[in-house]
Image (cartoon, grey):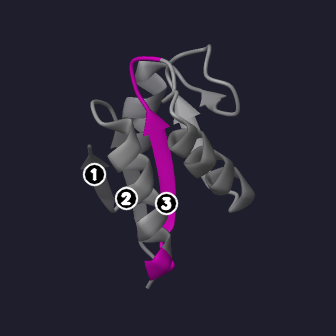
Amino acid sequence: MVKTIAVLVRDRPGEALRMALGLTLVDDIIDVYMLNGKSAGTEQDQLNLELMEEMEMNIYSNHKGNKGMRYLSTEQIAHKLLAYDHVLPY
């Protein structure tokens, strides 16, 4: 049975993005939420985000300035999180 998993990216974006990519190995549906700020600026983080886009993962942010991410308000994100089987804050 396929599970739905939300990864909340907050304090350590590099590790959270890497973890989200690793979770794709279990064939579950993984969505990523970049919260409260601009996306990670390191080269590795950008490569991880590009790979997520290629894998057609959903990437959301509550910051309008994040390129390549669908904007959702904090309230919209909170509502969407109720539908997941697992929510992993990182």
Q: How crowded is mark 1: few (under 14 residues within 10 Å), some or many (20 or more)?
A: few
Relative to 28, is 56 above or below?
A: above
Query: Label 2, on which residue?
Result: 19
What residue sits 30% from the left and 59% below the top?
86
What residue sits 57% from the left and 38% below the top?
43
Q: Is any part of residue 82 visible from this angle?
A: no
In the image, is 16 to the left or to the right of 90?
A: right
**Where in the figure is residue 34, as x and y percent of width and height?**
45, 32
**Where in the figure is residue 36, as x and y percent of width and height?**
39, 18
Task: Mark 1 and mark 3 in contact? Answer it, CB < 8 Å.
Answer: no
Which label was assigned to residue 30?
A: 3
Disc 2 is placed on an element classified as helix
Magenta residues span: 25-37
Q: How crowded is mark 2: few (under 14 residues within 10 Å), some or many (20 or more)?
A: some
Query: Label 1, on which residue?
Result: 88
Residue 81, quarter of picture = top left
Relative to 53, is 76 above or below?
A: above
Q: What residue type is labelled 2?
A: Met
Sequence-wise, which precedes: disc 2 or disc 1?
2
Between residue 88 and residue 2, name the one nearer to us. 88
Task: Name the residue at the front extreme.
Answer: 43
Distance in Å between CA atoms under marks 1 and 3: 10 Å
Residue 51, quarter of picture = bottom right
Q: Nearer the viewer, mark 2 or mark 1?
A: 2
Q: How crowded is mark 3: few (under 14 residues within 10 Å), some or many (20 or more)?
A: many
Distance in Å between CA atoms under marks 2 and 1: 10 Å
**Position of the C terminus by quadrant:** top left
Task: Mark 2 and mark 1 in contact? Answer it, CB < 8 Å.
Answer: yes
Which label was assigned to residue 41?
A: none
Sequence-wise, which precedes: disc 1 or disc 3?
3
Relative to 77, is 25 above or below?
A: below
